[in-house]
Structures are given as C-alpha cells and as structure tokens.
Amino acid sequence: MDTLIFGGLLAAWFVLHQQRARALLLGVWALTFVAVLFLLAHHITSGLSLGLSY
C-alpha cells in the first residue's frame, strides 16, 4: 500500500512539474486516494490470522 501511495505522489509531482491542467492533478490525486481506500478496505476485511502463538 505504501508503494501505491508513493506512486500516486510521484505521479502528482510529475503532473505539477510538467505544469499540466489542475484537473489532471486532482484526477491523479483522487484516483490514488480511491485505490488506497479500496486496498485498505480489502486488508481490513480479509481473513488475516493475526493471533500470536509462541
């Protein structure tokens, strides 16, 4: 998930650096945000065995 966040930040920086339209920057940010939310929801609801056994 960290890779997705940093990839979105890199894409947003690239859009800023190229001085593209502000709508494209907001689109990149929104797409990254939605992707992170879906991935977070998947991780929260997945059946991970988090029990500790020594």
Image (cartoon, rainbow, N blue to C red):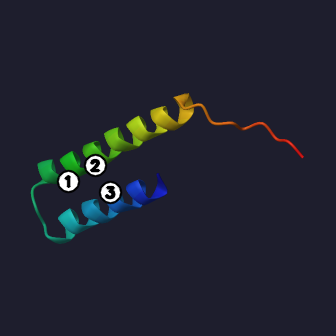
Nearer to us in this view, 19 or 37: 37
Q: Left or right: where does residue 47 sit relative to residue 27?
A: right
* Residue 8 numbered tag: 3
Residue at image coords 43%, 60%: 3
Decide: few, some or many residues near mark 3? Use Cα within 10 Å; few <14, some 14-19, many ≥20.
Answer: many
Q: Residue furthest right?
A: 54
Q: Residue at x 40, y 43 (%)?
A: 36
Q: Position of residue 17 (x, y in %)?
A: 20, 71
- Asked whether disc 1 touches disc 3, contact meaning CB atoms under 8 Å apart, the reply is no
Secondary structure at badge 3 equals: helix
Q: Where 20 falls versus 29 (above or below)? A: below
Based on the displayed image, in which of its 4 quarters is residue 34 positioned?
A: top left
x 26%, y 62%: residue: 11
Of badges 1 and 3, nearer the viewer stands 3
Looking at numbered disc 1 in the image, what kind of residue is underneath it? Leu
Residue on which disc 2 sits:
29
Say if 46 sits above or below 52 in the image.
Answer: above
The tag on residue 25 is 1
54 and 7: which is toward the camera? 54
SS for tag 2?
Answer: helix
- Please say if the residues under marks 1 and 2 sit with CB atoms less than 8 Å apart: yes
Image location of residue 35, percent across then percent down? 34, 42
Tell which tag, 2 or 3, sits nearer the viewer: 3
The three-letter code of the residue at mark 2 reads Trp
Q: CA distance from mark 2 to mark 3?
A: 7 Å
- Is there a contact, CB below 8 Å, between mark 2 and mark 3? yes
Q: Position of residue 25 (x, y in %)?
A: 20, 53
**Residue 50 image offset from top left, x and y in percent:** 72, 38
Instruction: Kindly give the residue lying farthest to the left in the view shown.
Output: 21
Q: Earlier in the sequence, mark 1 or mark 3?
A: 3
Question: Quick one: 48 or 6, which is closer to the camera?
Answer: 48
C-alpha span from label 1 to label 2 = 6 Å
